[in-house]
Image: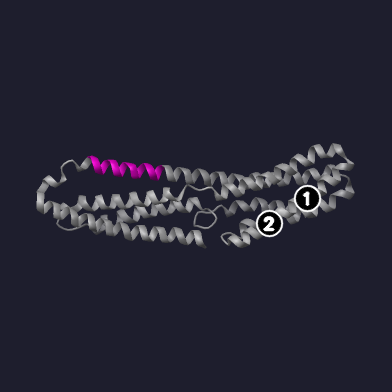
């Protein structure tokens, strides 16, 4: 499970890094206090506010983007089920002798499409299922064209439905692979470490560090970043859209 593992590793490294950054900030702050006294804090509020504000802005944008893409991917599952169901129903307009072959191809095609996403996060297996589905698209199109040559009127209904059914597969594939640049997540991690450093510096005046605040601050920010990553990859993490595949499974059951 490469993507999930990467998210866990990223969050784990970030958590440890934030604890270390707070410790570093604390030590730097205490040295400055010993050297300059309270004057070492002059003018730092504006800097802290700017960095923490930027961190909040980055989290908001990243979370909103991940949530939006999640909703799009979830909607596309339903859209594909509707497209396949519509095309399958329009087989009825063909001559009775042309229908059995197309219906069997549709059943195999729907099975392949379900298998593509069921195989994830096993990328090679998912690609194999995708290639099988793509091959079946060619067979369905050839069988459909052959059938409508005898009934041109039926082609006006069936062929556009087949086009829509095929097009949605490309849309879903691209939606699955659409993510922000890695630099965005790197920037998010860098800002989290910078905030931890500043937070540690700000706690330098206390005689004893508050473990609750040190660990809590790191844990909350780390969890937030992890949730964003989990939202971004809804096929392999805790937040998933697998339940929406049921509409395709139910459609396949109706094709008996």
**x%, y% of residue 133?**
70, 54
Q: Which residue is mark 1?
A: 140
The magenta region covers 46-60
Q: Is residue 70 left or right of residue 126?
A: left
**Tag nearer the camera, 1 or 2:** 2
Q: Secondary structure at mark 2?
A: helix
Q: How many marks?
A: 2
Q: Residues within 10 Å of mark 1 (few under 14, many from 20)?
A: many
Q: Which residue is mark 2?
A: 131
Main secondary structure along the magenta-highlighted residues: helix
**x%, y% of residue 99?**
84, 49
Residue under the point 86% across and 38% down: 152
Q: Is residue 251 left or right of residue 24?
A: right
Q: Is residue 54 magenta?
A: yes
Spatial CA distance of label 1 from label 2 is 14 Å
**x%, y% of residue 226?**
42, 54
CB within 8 Å, label 1 to label 2: no
Residue under the point 49% across and 50% down: 232
Classify 226 as above or below 90: below
**x%, y% of residue 143?**
82, 49
């Amino acid at each position: 499970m490469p993507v999930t593992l990467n998210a866990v590793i990223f969050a784990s490294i970030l958590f440890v890094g934030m604890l270390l950054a707070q410790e570093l900030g604390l030590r730097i702050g205490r040295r400055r206090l010993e050297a300059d006294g309270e004057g070492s804090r002059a003018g730092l509020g504006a800097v802290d506010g700017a960095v923490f504000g930027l961190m909040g802005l980055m989290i908001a944008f990243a979370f909103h983007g991940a949530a939006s893409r999640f909703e799009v991917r979830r909607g596309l599952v339903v859209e594909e089920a509707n497209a396949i169901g519509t095309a399958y129903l329009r087989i009825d307009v063909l001559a009775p002798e042309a229908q059995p072959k197309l219906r069997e191809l549709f059943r195999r095609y729907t099975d392949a499409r379900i298998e593509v996403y069921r195989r994830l996060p096993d990328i090679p297996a998912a690609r194999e299922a995708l290639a099988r589905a793509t091959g079946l698209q060619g067979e369905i199109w050839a069988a459909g064209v052959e059938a409508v040559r005898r009934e041109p009127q039926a082609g006006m209904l069936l062929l556009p439905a087949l086009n829509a059914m095929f097009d949605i597969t490309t849309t879903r594939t691209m939606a699955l692979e659409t993510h922000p640049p890695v630099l965005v997540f790197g920037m998010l991690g860098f800002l989290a470490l910078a905030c931890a450093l500043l937070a540690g510096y700000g706690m330098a005046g206390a005689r004893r560090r508050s473990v609750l605040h040190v660990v809590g601050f790191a844990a909350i920010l780390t969890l937030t970043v992890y949730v964003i990553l989990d939202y971004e990859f809804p096929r392999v993490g805790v937040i998933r859209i697998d339940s929406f595949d049921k509409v395709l499974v139910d459609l396949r059951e109706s094709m008996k």
